[in-house]
Image: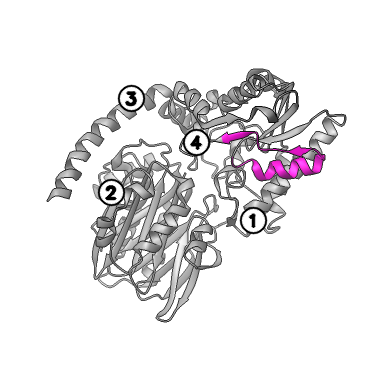
Amino acid sequence: MCGVVGVVGKSDVNLQLYDALTMLQHRGQDAAGMVTCEDGRISQQKANGLVKDVFRTRHMQRLVGNYGIGHVRYPTAGSSGPALAQPFYVNSPYGIALAHNGNLTNAESVCEDLYRTDLRHMNTDSDSEVLLNVFAQELQKIHKHQPTAEDFMRAIEGVHKRTIGGYAVVSLIANYGLVAFRDPNGIRPLVFGERQTPLGTEYMIASESVALDVAGFTLTRDVRPGEAIYISKEGELHTRQCAEGAEYSPCIFEHVYFARPDSIIDGISVYKARLRQGEKLAEKILREFPEHDIDVVIPIPDSSRVAGQALAHTLGVKFREGLVKNRYIGRTFIMPGQQQRKKSVRQKLNPISLEFKGKNVLLIDDSIVRGTTCEQIIQMARDAGAAKVYIASAAPPVKYPNVYGIDMPTAQELVAHGLTTDEVCKAIGADWLVYQDLEDLIQASSEGNPEITAFDCAVFDGNYVTHDVDQSYLDRLAEKRSEKAQTKQRELDLDNSNVVGIHNDSAENA
């Protein structure tokens, strides 16, 4: 999962990109990067770390130009060394930088085709680099010294025909401007907006609408599935549908967990969708446990808080903050290594004992993935004196891996894979467990935009909307994501980072 942003302005856009990336920091805390262009000269800064640590004053001073793109990264199927920080760049044709959120499911075959047809060599195992080279190759086929907006659209048509998966892309083309496009299913989110200035209209494209808000841009709309946008460096806007059979199937897990509650995605308020999740979950509790003895609802921070408030209100019980979060610990289900995850949960959350002692507590979480976090929090609640500990999940059981850009575990590491609800309840040590029904989750989101009738719910039902994911693909993905493979990859990344670090130090001193 990553965050992308692109801006075409009337003056230097580096500060706008920086502010937007800070608003998208929740989408990626592994690395950050930015590319700008002035008079055909591209400037770049990227590294591992948070936005505030990657960009210093000396970097911002050289990141000049009235158009640019930025990226924040969580590692997905690839490795996590500094070489994986985006945007990526190729110098032919024109000079192209690209930032990508998502994952290609046919990256391996496309990579082989790129080498066979054009001798293009990939420097990383990132499918973002594959996307960049496909786009570059499609532009090379057109072979114009002065390409038009229509030429860029034709190149994106070629990208859609050759790539499969979930992707939202922003790309900078030196001397020309920005292009952006979204996969034909609209799996990964992408919006654009504008801002009026005395010098003319400025444009921003981003993963979430909150990035527009901080810079004073007005949300125009979402980029539609399969749609491409080209904004020239002078600020001329061009849009066109570039994919056949494009149809909305956005990732519903954005509404459950990843997106900020103050974002609007595909016309749906994430905040209101989460309120509806809580209401529907409460209705299920009242059906299945009508004589419940719940004394208090306590959210597992942060993304379950909105659903928890609605759930408590509908049940007519108290809502209390019983767990204090250390905001300097990352997301635990993405962290490598089971021991590191267990340690980080204890560092991440601390209970307020008086909210637990002697009470029947209903903990609510946005989802239950590995079960590692829930198991430890349930034990925390018992240690703090809770009489009974119930747990509610605002999402259905997560039984299948995500293949479109969220680095979830393999199926065998998912606590709900192959287990009944009662068996999961026993495994995590709860007195009672209730999951959201998938139909209710879909309704909670689709009520916000009735035109969207289908979502990518593959992590819950195993139905992958691109129709190219079979068991052999999942087996290969499981091998790549296995603990042993990731440990080996981290060792390689560490070796690479040492080399890259020496190079960067030398460049800085030059």
Magenta-highlighted residues: 302-324
The reply to whether the C-beta atoms of the residues labelled 2 and 1 are less than 8 Å apart is no
Circle 4 sits on which residue? 331
Circle 2 sits on which residue? 117
Tell me which label, 4 or 2, sits earlier in the chain. 2
The reply to whether the C-beta atoms of the residues labelled 1 and 3 are less than 8 Å apart is no
Up-down: is 330 above or below 186? above
Q: Nearer the viewer, mark 4 or mark 2?
A: 4
At label 3, the amino acid type is Lys
**Where residue 243 sits in the image (x, y, percent)?**
50, 59
Circle 1 sits on which residue? 269
CA gap between label 4 and label 1 equals 23 Å
Q: Secondary structure at mark 3?
A: helix
> Can you tell which quarter of the image residue 287 is in?
top right
At label 4, the amino acid type is Arg
CA gap between label 1 and label 3 equals 41 Å
CA gap between label 2 and label 1 equals 45 Å
Can you tell which mark lies on residue 488?
3
Tell me which label, 4 or 3, sits earlier in the chain. 4
Q: Secondary structure at mark 4?
A: loop
Q: Is 338 on the left-hand or right-hand side of 386?
A: left
Tell me which label, 2 or 3, sits earlier in the chain. 2
> Can you tell which quarter of the image residue 222 is in?
bottom right
Residue nearer the viewer, 115 or 309: 309
Considering every residue shown, the one lying at the far right of the view is 291
Tell me which label, 1 or 3, sits earlier in the chain. 1
Number of numbered discs present? 4
